[in-house]
Amino acid sequence: MGHRCCSKQKVKRGLWSPEEDEKLVKYIATHGHGSWSSVPKFAGLKRCGKSCRLRWLNYLRPELKKGCFSALEEQVIIDAHRILGNRWSQISKHLPGRTDNEVKNFWNSRLKKKLMAQGLDPKTHNLIPSHQRAANKVACNISPSNQQPFSIISQDSKMKDVSMEINPPILTLASPYPSNSSAQPSMLQTTTSLPLPSSCYDNNPSLIWNVNTQNSYDSSLFPCVSFIENSLVSPSSSTSVNPTGFGLLDEDCFWSCGNIVEPFEAARLFEGMRSQDQENQLNKICDTQIVDKNKGVHDNMDAPFDTSIYDLELVDSKLFPGSMCRDLSSMDDLSWNF
DNA sequence: AAAGCCTCCAACCGCATTCAG
DNA sequence: TCTGAATGCGGTTGGAGGCTT
């Protein structure tokens, strides 16, 4: 049984030989792929069109990046996966030169295990209760000092509270205030299972991040976190940033990824929902040091991707009260398509 | 040395969606 | 509007190569 697209012809399967690769590359270089179903015929390959397409997209395309994933790419995948789930194609769009297949394989072979070793559920990115981890025999002898700042905000608020009780978060939410500040809400000292303060969602934020200001992570590993942290605590921004430790990004803000600056359009989810006042507030926020609305996240293009931590369901639940189970397929509309 | 196990990743499979007639 | 073909996507598989015993 072959592919339906080529059931009438005998097709070769399995690994591609260098000769086949050469034929395909030559053909596409001169003619383009056009209709994939006709490529094997014209290129002189005994493969089905689907197989040719896959080979080209995943291996032969010149713009593909070879080699190991960088720490930055790894973080992008984790953050994107937290929002998008197994939408590998969407996730790979944030990683120039990487294919969905590559990202998927990397996730399944490495990142999933890494998260589990850190006591995080790779599906939800929640902390797994310690007894469950023991039951799963997941090694978790990680001390707080070497935990990396992955998501501690749950996408499933029902689970979140339970896991937090059993297994207090290793990371604490950021506070833009000095610890001795009387303005600092006390709850910020404690856990991640916070109700989203109205000051946060009043703006219909497209993106929320939390930032650890307690220096419990190695900032050399995540210098970008330090960057945002510093921005948050800077006098010029602390007044315009809501006092929750969350920051806001407007739809016009950009996501800086290495040398590539891409527009971050997640806010489209909330497009049309904002009043003029809200728009103004967002503009005000974007005018702070945190983000440069027009140019990008910040002037330092070398600063790596920020380890923003999103909780879209939480945002969702606040923005769309009573719709906790809202279909997150709308995430596609967030336009992670740059 | 070799058998067994494990990991990784290229490729396949089948379903969903889009497109064209 | 319907239908079949083409394309896109995510889950799964199988084999190559490395590691362990």
Image (cartoon, coloured by chain):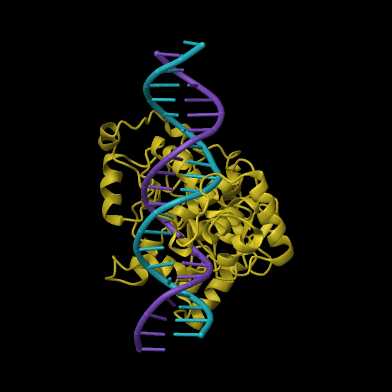
Chain colours: A yellow, B cyan, C purple
User: In the rendered view, does A290 fall on the left or right side of A335?
Assistant: right
Q: Residue at x 44, y 79 (%)?
A: A273
User: Which quadrant is the C terminus of chain A positioned in?
Assistant: bottom right
Q: Residue at x 40, y 51 (%)?
A: A188
Position in image of residue A256 (x %, y %): 63, 57
Q: Residue at x 56, y 67 (%)?
A: A285
User: Which quadrant is the N terminus of chain A positioned in?
Assistant: bottom left
Residue placed most toward the observer, A30 or A110: A30
The outermost residue toward the right is A30
Residue A211 in view of the camera: no
Q: Is residue A116 above or below residue A10?
A: above
- The quarter holding residue A316 reads bottom left
User: In the rendered view, does A148 fall on the left or right side of A252?
Assistant: left
Q: Is residue B12 above or below residue A198?
A: above
Residue placed most toward the observer, A224 or A276: A224
Residue A141 in view of the camera: yes
Q: Residue at x 47, y 42 (%)?
A: A111
Q: Is residue A190 above or below residue A330?
A: above
